[in-house]
Image: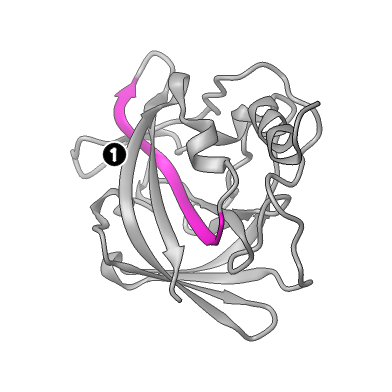
Amino acid sequence: MLSWARRVLAAVAAVAGVVALVSGGGDHPSGGTRAAAVEVAAQAPPAPAPVRLVNPATSTAVPVRVAIPAIGVDSGLVDLGVDATGALAPPSDFSTAGWFATGTVPGETGPAVIAGHVDDYTGPAVFFRLEELHVGDRVLVSRSDGQTVAFTVDRVAEYPKDDFATDEVYGPTTGAELRLITCGGTFDRSRRSYVDNIVVFARADA
């Protein structure tokens, strides 16, 4: 019989599509290397309804704001779910980040997930500079219960969307952790989508 942890990982694999993000539409007007996408680049087959990825929350608090001083991010947070294909449905507002609301609440044990667009046809979006973060940078998440949870970045990774490290990003953790996700890598103009995801891994300060 599968252990509880292995059953959770099996559920995570079933919703592997949550790693895909939208990143906008049209060429970047600044002439930079990024251009924007207009479709979800889901790389997984249809998945069941969203599930809580790791541990049930022990409080009713929800995150309401994320601040990343090193890259000038200060954004409210909207709830994110998954679409019919199992892919993470990104925020409708390109200037606002969102959190995976059926996952872990930031500050609780497990990997909380916050996602945002990298750009759109008008220029940079909320997580345009996410890949510039370095080990030791701080991420502050404010919650509805008045707490602010401080996280410290311990690594930044880039994964192909068609070979995403689902277990590494969404698998169980022994403490409170955070994943920040956006699009990155080369822009595939035929698909109007970036080929990679940028993932920032951070741990809650002791």
Residue 178 visible in this rendered orientation of the protein: yes
Please state the horizontal and vertical placement of residue 73, each as a whole percent of the image: 38, 67
For residue 197, side relative to residue 83 (left or right): left
Q: Nearer the viewer, residue 24 or 104?
A: 104
Residue 21 visible in this rendered orientation of the protein: no
Q: Residue tagged by mark 1?
A: 28
For residue 68, side relative to residue 173 (left or right): left
Whether 148 is drawn above or below 176: the answer is: below
> Magenta-highlighted stretch: main secondary structure?
strand
Whether 26 is drawn above or below 62: the answer is: above
Q: Quadrant of the C terminus?
A: bottom left
For image coordinates 64% across by 60% down, the residue present is 78
Total labels drawn = 1
Q: Is residue 200 magenta?
A: no
Please state the horizontal and vertical placement of residue 5, each as a whole percent of the image: 69, 40
For image coordinates 66% across by 56% down, the residue present is 104
Q: Residue at the top extreme?
A: 190
Q: Quadrant of the N terminus?
A: top right
How was this image coloured?
A: one colour
For image coordinates 43% across by 17% down, the residue present is 191
For image coordinates 53% across by 32% down, the residue present is 166
Instruction: Determine which quarter of the picture holds residue 31.
Output: top left
Q: Is residue 177 magenta?
A: yes
Label 1's element?
loop
- The magenta-colored residue range is 174-188
